[in-house]
Amino acid sequence: MPHKDEFDLENVDGIGPKTAQMLQSKGIISARHLALFTPEELVDITDMTPDRAEKILRSARELVFGSRRALKGTELLKLSQDVPRLTTGVKSIDKLLGGGLEPKATYEFAGEFGTGKTQLCHQLAVTVQLPREKGGVGGACAYIDTEEAFSPSRIEAIAKRFGLDPQQALDNIYVIKVVNAADLEDRIKFDLVRLVEQNNVKLVIIDSIIALYRAEFKGRERLAERQQRLNYILDWLMRVAKVYGIYIVLTNQVIDVPLGYIEVKKPAGGNVLAHAVTHRLFLKKSREDLRVMEVLDSPRLPFKASAMFRITDKGVEDA
Ligand SMILES: Nc1ncnc2c1ncn2[C@@H]1O[C@H](COP(=O)(O)OP(=O)(O)OP(=O)(O)O)[C@@H](O)[C@H]1O
Ligand SMILES: [Mg+2]
């Protein structure tokens, strides 16, 4: 029984029309979406028995990933050279990042207030829409705004600079407001996947990741719980990124850590965030409108390498 879309739920072994309908009523839209879930999560939302959940998830993964074999180093090298890099619209930053952002990785921009994290996110929400030959990927953006910082007028100004129609640019940005951690989890597990599958979303921004968790899980007693929830959401984001090949950007606040007689600024979120993100970048103020981006931790970028940029009325530009 062939279906028009190879990743329709009914193409998963063991899923008939009734189960497909039931899964859809719970918000699971395709075999690829289904394959993101763990058996425990599926039992949680559907009342399936653990055995059945495990069985259909295995079939879903088989359909989605096929028979995955291990890849040789040379094949991986070739694949890594072929990935489309997403431009930030700033030459010095693109160069620092090895040609722009890579998909299936998480970028963290951490820094004090006013260092340009939100401005850079706005710029990426525009550059992702550019065609390939201009450094974009012709995609839409999901902007998860936890700080009420999204600014349509900034998007208009940046879009004009890059030769895009401002209205169209705004139409291609899906702004998601979340109220707490549980809401964020739901939005990422369901709404975000729908936007990626049906609305061509290629870039996901969370500005900022930590604000919600700092506000909701207050005090030392709740730190372990906070870190666990943070870990959970980051893991889900990575699942989505890996299956759909999208770009992920998180912003993060800083904390003061005493070091002998002085205090140094470090990204918030502790070890959980440090391990979960792929590329950690630290943004600092220099004089006037000048800013510095510095590599704090990355498996591929040199430690402490840096790029200068400035914030202008047109967005983020080379210094
Ligand atoms: N239209 C504009 N023209 C020039 N500079 C601007 C404009 N809009 C914002 N800025 C500058 O951008 C900076 C704010 O950057 P941004 O909002 O990205 O900070 P942030 O790192 O996100 O801070 P926070 O931690 O508070 O969210 C300010 O210094 C501001 O002067
Ligand atoms: Mg901000």
Image (cartoon, rainbow, N blue to C red):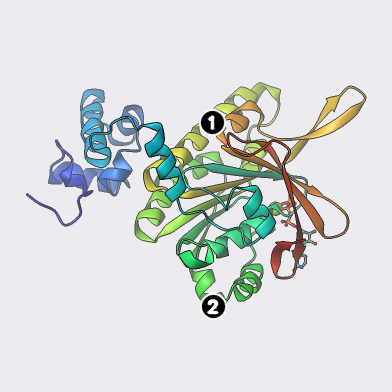
**Residue furthest right as drawn:** 261
Residue at left offset 82%, top offset 57%: 290
Disc 1 or 2, which lies upstream in sequence?
Answer: 2
Question: Ligand 1 is in which quadrant of the figure?
Answer: bottom right
Instruction: Report the residue at 55% width, 75% height from top.
Output: 164
- Report the residue that reaches farthest toward the left: 1
Percent coordinates x, y for residue 161 in the rendering: 64, 74
Label 2's element? loop
State whether residue 119 appears in this view.
yes
Question: Which residue type carries mark 2?
Answer: Asp
Q: Residue furthest front?
A: 74
x%, y% of residue 187? 46, 47
Cα distance in 3D space between marks 1 and 2: 38 Å
Q: Which mark is residue 231?
A: 1
Of circles 1 and 2, the one toward us is 2
Residues packed near mark 1 inside 10 Å, few (<14), some (14 to 19) or many (20 plus): some
Give the quadrant of residue 48: top left
- Observer-nearest of 25 and 36: 36
Q: Closest to the observer: 48 or 287?
A: 287
Query: In the rendered structure, which amino acid carries the disc numbered 1?
Result: Asn
Residue of label 2: 165
Q: Say which element carries label 1.
A: helix
Whether residue 240 is visible to the viewer of this picture, yes or no, is no
- Residue 197 image position (x, y, % from top left): 35, 55
Circle number at residue 74: none
Mark 1, ligand 1, within 8 Å: the answer is no
Sort mark 2 into few (<14), some (14-19) or many (20+) by Cα contacts within 10 Å. Answer: few
Query: 128 above or below 36?
Result: below
| Position above or below: 196 against 264 | below
Spot occupied by residue 238 in the image (x, y as percentages of width and height): 46, 39
